[in-house]
Amino acid sequence: MSLSESPTIEVKDLKTYFFTKGGIARAVDGVSFSVGRGKVLGLVGESGSGKTVTGFSILGLVDEPGRIVGGEILYRGENLVSASPDRMRELRGVNISMIFQDPMMTLNPVLRIDTQMIEALQAHESISKDDARQRARDVLGQVGIASPDERLRSYPHQFSGGMRQRVAIAIALLNKPDLIVADEPTTALDVTIQGQILYEVQKLCSQTGTALIWITHDLSVVAGLADDICVMYAGRIVEQGSVNSVLDKPMHPYTDGLISSVPSRNKRGVPLAQIPGMAPSLLKLPKGCSFGPRCAHFSNACDSIPDISNYENGRQIRCHNPLGAGTTLRVTD
Amino acid sequence: MSVFIIRRLMQSALVVVIMSFIVFSGVFLVGDPVEILVSDDADQEEREMMIKSMGLDKPFLVQYGIFISKAIRGDLGDSFVFQEPALLLILDRMPATMELAVVALLIAIVFGIPLGVWAGLKPESLASKSIMTGSILGFSLPTFWVGIMMILLFAVVLGWLPSTGRGDVQIILGMPISVFSWDGFSHVLMPAVNLALFKLSMVIRLARAGTREVMHQDYIKFARAKGLKEQRIILVHVLKNILIPVVTVLGLEFGGLVAFSVVTETVFAWPGMGKLLIDSIGLLDRPIIVAYLMIIVFLFVLINLLVDICYSILDPRVRLQDIKS
Amino acid sequence: MTTAENNMESEEKGYEGVQTPLRRFLSDFCEAKLAVVGFFTILAIALVAIMAPFIAPTDPYDLATVSVLDSRLAPGEAMMNGTTAHLGTDGAGRDMVSAMIYGLRISLGVGIGSGLIAMLIGISFGLLSAYAGGKIDSIFMRIVDIQLSFPAILVALVLLVTLGKGVDKTIIALVVVQWAYYARTIRGTALVERRREYIESAVCLGLSKNRIMFRHLLPNCLAPMIVVGTMQIAHAISLEATLSFLGLGMPQTEPSLGRLISNGFEYILSGKYWISVYPGIALLVTIVSINLVGDRLRDVLNPRLQK
Ligand SMILES: Nc1ncnc2c1ncn2[C@@H]1O[C@H](COP(=O)(O)OP(=O)(O)OP(=O)(O)O)[C@@H](O)[C@H]1O
Ligand code: SF4
Ligand SMILES: [Mg+2]
C-alpha cells in the first residue's frame, strides 16, 4: 500500500447520525479509511453495522432523518461533505457510482432498461440517443448479458434478480467512474456468475484505475478481491489493514470471530464457531466497548470505549486486549 | 390478451342485464304516470286506453320482457311527456354532459397532479399542509352549494360569467361543443370547475400519497446515484409511477363525474342529460328515467373495460400477465 | 462518555413509552390543532342540534307563528311578532336562525342515524362474510362490488324516486348507499386479523365462534370502523343535502339544511343571498369539522403510517 500517491477517496472521521423519534442512531461514528487508484477496499461487518450508510454518505445520498454530522470525505482532495448539491449531482454517476444492495428494487419498474441506461449517460454529457444506446449495449455485454439489444427493450420485471443486478452493475460502469461503491453486489448472484462479475470488476479496476469499495458479509470474496479490509462493528471500524495480514492474523476479537465462523475445507468436521449474542441496537449501545457483551476477552478496561491503536504494516485496531499483541509491534506516534 | 378481453366482455354483459332488471323493477314502482298524463276531466275509458297504449296493464315480468327485447334493438320506449324515443332524447343531451365531464376531468388532472406531487415532495412544508387542508375542504363542500355560491359571486355580484345555459355551440365532429368559442367557454367554466372540485381533491390526495410512497423507493435513490437531475427524477421516474393509480381511479371515476353532473346541471341549468333526468323525475316520465339509468350502466361497464386496457398499457407488469393468461 | 449519555437518553425514552394506548392516541390526535378545533366544533354543533327547541328563537314548524308577510326579510330586520331576524327570513317567512337550528338537527340526525344503521348492517354482513368464507363470501362481495361501482348519488336518487319523501325514506336510501363501504372495510380487516395468531389460539382454547367474532375480532376492527364511520357520516350529511336540493329526500314541511339552501336558490339571482348562504355555511362547518377529525383519525389510527 503506497501512501505516496494521493488516494482517490479519503474518508476522515466520518460521522453520520440518524435523528429518529426513538433517539439518535450513530450509524457511522468516526470512520476513516482511504482507497487509492485501482485499489479495492473490502468493507465487512454484520447487518446494521453501518456499511451501507457509509456508502450513501460518500455519494451524498443519506436520507432523512439522517445527516452527516462530522468528518470529511475527500474525493481527489475535494471535500464532498461541504460540496453543493449541484456539484454532488455532477459527480454522481460519472466520477462516483454505486451499486445497490437489493437488485429487485433498484430499477424503476415502469421504465424500460434502455431508458434507464440512456438517461444515465445523457445526464452527464451531450450524447445522441443512438450513441448512448450503443454504449449501453456494449456495457451490458461486458457484464455478461446475452442478446443485449433485445434486453434493452425489456422492463425490469422481465429479468431475474441476478440479471437485474448485472444491469445495475452495468449502469454503474457506464460512465467509467473513478470510484465505485459496490454494496453487496454479488449476494444475489449464483456462484459462477459471481466469479465472472468479480473478475470483470477486478479487471476494470486495474485497467482503468477505478477505486472500489466493496461492501460484503462474505469474507471469502474479500480475500480474493480486496487489497485492504475494514471491519465495521456498530458504526465504528474495529480493525483495518491489508487483507492478507488481517485475515491471517486477526487482532480484534470480533474479526477473529467472523473468520472462525466462515466454513472452510480444513475445518471440516469441526463445529463452526459462532459469535455469541446479537448485534446491539444502535439506540442502546452497551457502555464502553460496544462488542463487550459478546466478547470472550472482556476485561475491566473494556468499560471505556477503546481508541484506535496503530500497529506495524499500517494495521489499526480498536480494542483494549488485541489478540496476538505480543507478536505484532504496536506503533506509537 | 383477446381471451382476457372476451371474458371481460361477457362479465360486462351480465352486469348490464342484472342492472337492467334492478333498474326496471325499481322504476316500475314509481308513482302512477297515468295520473299525470291524462287530463283531469278524462273519463275511465280514456284512462284505460291510455294504460293499454303504454302497456301498463300487463304483468310486471311481461313488461320487463318486452322492455328487454326492445332494448336490445335500441328502443328504450317513448317519453310519456315528449312522445319521442327516450333514447334519442337522452343521446341528444349527451354531448353537453360529456363536454362538462371531460372539461371537469381535465381541470382535475391539470391542477390536481402537480399540486399533489408538490405536496408529496415536501410533506412538512406549509404549502403542502395548506394544499391538504384545501383538499379536505374540496371533499367537504357540497357541490350544489358551491355552485350556488359561484353563481352568487361571479354572476350576481361581479357579473363576470353567465349563470345559466350553454352559450354558443359549434358543431365539431358532428357534436355540439361549447368550449371553443369565448361565449361557450364562459358558460362552461363555472359548471366545469364546480363539477371538478371533488375530483380535484381526490387527485391531489392520490398524487400526494403516490409521490410519498415512490420517493422512498430504492429506484429513486438509484436514479439519484446515477446523477440525474431532480427534474427528470420527478417528471419521469416519479410521475410515471404515480400516473398508474391516478389514471385508474380517474378513469373509474369518470362515470361518477357524469352521474354527479346531475347536480351541477341542475344548479347551472346546463342542458345535459342530468338535467333531463331531474326534470323527468319531477314529471314521472318513466321511460326517460329508465333510459338514463341504462345508459349510465352501459357507460360504467364500458369505462371499466377501457380503464383495464389503459392500465395494461401504462403498467408493463400487468401487460405481461394478460399475455400469459 | 457519549455511550453513557446515550444510555440515559434511551432510558428516558423508556419511561415515556409506558404511556397507555389511549393517552398516546390522544396526544397523537392533538398534535394536529385543526383536528382538535374540528372536534370541539362538532361537539358544539351537536349540542345546538339537541337543544334546538330551547335555543331557537321561534318554532319554524309551527304554522300558526310563521307568517308569509315576514318572507324574505333581510338579516337584522324585525319580524311581525317583534323578534329580530338576525339572519333574515326565508321565502315562507321563517326566521333563518330557527330554521337553520332545526335544519341542522334534521341533517345531523339523518346523517348520524343512517351512518349508524349502515354501520351495524355493514359490520354484520362484513364479519359474516369474512368468517363464513367460500361461496357466501364471494356472493356478498360481488354484491358489494357492484353496488360500490355505481355512484352513491344515483343509487340514492333512484331509491328516493321509488320511495318518495320523508325522514325515514331518506334514511333508508342513505343506509343502502353506505352499508357496503362498512361491509367491505370490516371484511378486509377481519380477514387480516383472522389470520393472526391470537385468533388461532382462541380457536385452540375452544372458545365459541360467536365469542371469537365479537370478543376478539371486533375490537381489532374498531379503528378502521371509526375512520370509515366519521368519513361516511360526513358524506351522508352532504348527500342528504344534495338530494334535498334536487327535490328528493326531505319534504318542504321539515326542511333540512339542504332544503333550506334549495329554497333560497330561486332568490339568489335577485341578490337575496342569506337564504342560501347561511344554511350552507352551517352545513359546510359541520362537514368540514367531521372530515378534519376523520382525516386525523385515519393518520393516527393507521398502523402503517406509525413510525
Ligand atoms: N433511514 C434510517 N432511519 C433510521 N436509522 C437508519 C436509517 N437507515 C439506516 N439506519 C441505521 O443505520 C444502521 C446501519 O444501517 P446500514 O444499512 O448501513 O447497515 P449495513 O451494515 O448496510 O447492514 P446490511 O448488511 O444489513 O446491509 C442501522 O442499524 C439503522 O439503525
Ligand atoms: S475492547 Fe474489550 S470488549 Fe471490546 S473487543 Fe476488545 S477485548 Fe473485547
Ligand atoms: Mg447494507
Image (spheres, coloured by chain):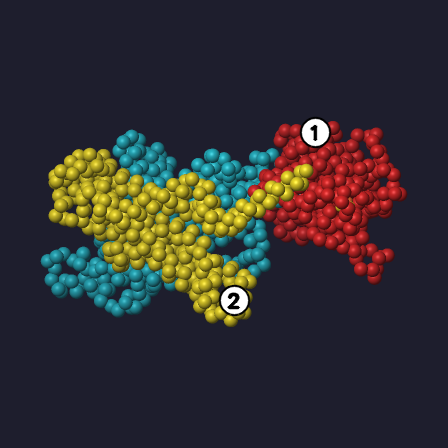
Chain colours: A red, B cyan, C yellow
Q: Does label 1 point to a residue whose CB lies under 8 Å from ligand 1?
A: no
Is A268 on the left-hand or right-hand side of B193? right
Binning the other alpha carbons within 10 Å of mark 1 as few (below 14), some (14 to 19) or many (20 upward) gives: some
Q: Which mark is residue A79?
A: 1
Q: Is B39 situated above or below B98?
A: below
For label 2, the crowd category at 10 Å Cα-Cα, with few meaning under 14, some 14 to 19 and many 20 or more, is some
Q: Which mark is residue A270?
A: none
Q: Is residue B315 visible?
A: yes
Residue C198 in percent (x, y) is at 53, 63
Residue that carries the numbered disc 2 in the rendered image: C202
Q: Are marks 1 and 2 in contact (CB under 8 Å)?
A: no
Identify the residue at image location x=62%, y=36%: A67
Observer-nearest of A234 and C153? A234
Chain letter for mark 1: A
Residue type at mark 2: give it.
Ala
| x, y percent for residue A260 | 80, 53
- Please state, as top left, top right, bottom left or bottom right, where the C terminus of chain A lies in the image: top right
Choose top left, top right, bottom left or bottom right for residue C261.
Answer: top left
Q: Position of residue A64 (x, y in %)?
A: 59, 39
Q: CA distance from mark 1 to mark 2?
A: 61 Å
Q: Is A313 on the left or on the right of B36, as rendered?
A: right
- Residue A89, how many percent across, how many down? 64, 33
The residue positioned 51% from the left and 49% from the top of the image is: C19
Pick whichever, C277 or C107, lies toward us: C107
Q: State which quarter of the image contains the N terminus of chain A.
A: top right
* Three-letter residue code for mark 1: Asn
| Residue A119 showing in the rendered view | no
Residue that extends furthest to the right in the rendered view of this protein: A327
Tell which of A160 and B133 is nearer to you: B133
In the image, what residue occupies the spot 67% across and 33% down? A70
Chain where mark 2 sits? C
Dot in front, 1 or 2: 2
